[in-house]
Amino acid sequence: MSEPTKPDEPVYQRLEGPLEYEQAINTLIQQARHQLRIFDYDLRNEGYNSQQRFELLQNFLLGNRANTLLIVLHDTRYLTGECPRMMNLIRQFSHAISIFQTTAEARIATDPFIIADDAHFLHRFHYDHPRAALSLNDKESALNLVRRFNEILELSEPAAPPTTLGL
């Protein structure tokens, strides 16, 4: 008879398609309790403008005033021009969300990933392909992506979201 899995035991899941990837993003957001780090090409085609994703991120940010969302993108045009729900979230939680755009030096990175609380992650092996891995409760493996995220962040600059100015 096998023993039941402990709640903090590492879990690894291989993902093969876009729908699985999108669902894994939601799972990861639900796991987050303090910090989310997202590195992506532009957030396109992964459900960031959906009502469900908006609510999950909003609930995460409402969970604790100290919660943070850090996003690094190669291209911010989709976010600022075609993703109104994310832009509303950025305006609502400007104290907790930081957006950065990579410089030319960092644009060689082609594998989007998301890290939650330095313990859970979703790693897509290339942004043109749907294959990915979801790992929960694996701080040791997540540490490599945390380091990588920090390296990419160092080669990025703040991307100020557009605001409507009036007199």
Image (cartoon, helix red, strand yellow):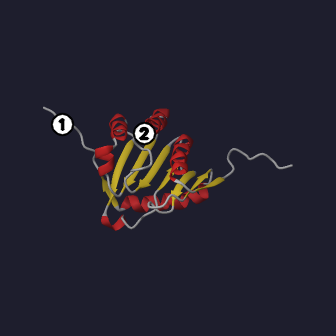
| Residue 56 percent across, percent down from the top left | 48, 37
Give the numbered dot on residue 122.
none
**Which residue is under mark 1?**
165
At label 2, the amino acid type is Ser
At mark 2, the secondary structure is loop
99 to 109, vertically: above or below: above
Q: How many marks?
A: 2
- Image location (x, y in percent) of residue 109: 41, 65
Percent of width and height locating residue 34: 51, 42
Quarter in which the C terminus is drawn: top left
- Neighbourhood count class around disc 1 (C-alpha, 10 Å): few under 14, some 14–19, many 20 upward: few
Residue located farthest toward the right when viewing the structure as drawn: 1
Give the residue pinned by disc 2.
50
Q: Nearer the viewer, mark 1 or mark 2?
A: 2
* Label 1 SS: loop
Could you tell me which residue is drawn at 42 percent across and 62 percent down?
A: 151
Of mark 1 and mark 2, the one earlier in the sequence is 2
Q: Amino acid at mark 1?
A: Leu
**Residue for point 52% across, 51% down:** 21
Q: Residue 50, percent across and down?
A: 42, 39
Is residue 40 positioned above or below 64 on the image? below
Residue at the extreme left: 167
Query: What distance separates the C-alpha of mark 1 from that of mark 2?
Result: 27 Å
Q: In the image shown, does 86 or 64 lie closer to the viewer?
A: 86
The reply to whether callout 1 and callout 2 are in contact (CB within 8 Å) is no
Which residue is at 54% across, 59% downward? Answer: 131
How would you rate the neighbour count of disc 2 (Cα within 10 Å): few for under 14, some for 14-19, many for 20 or more? Answer: few
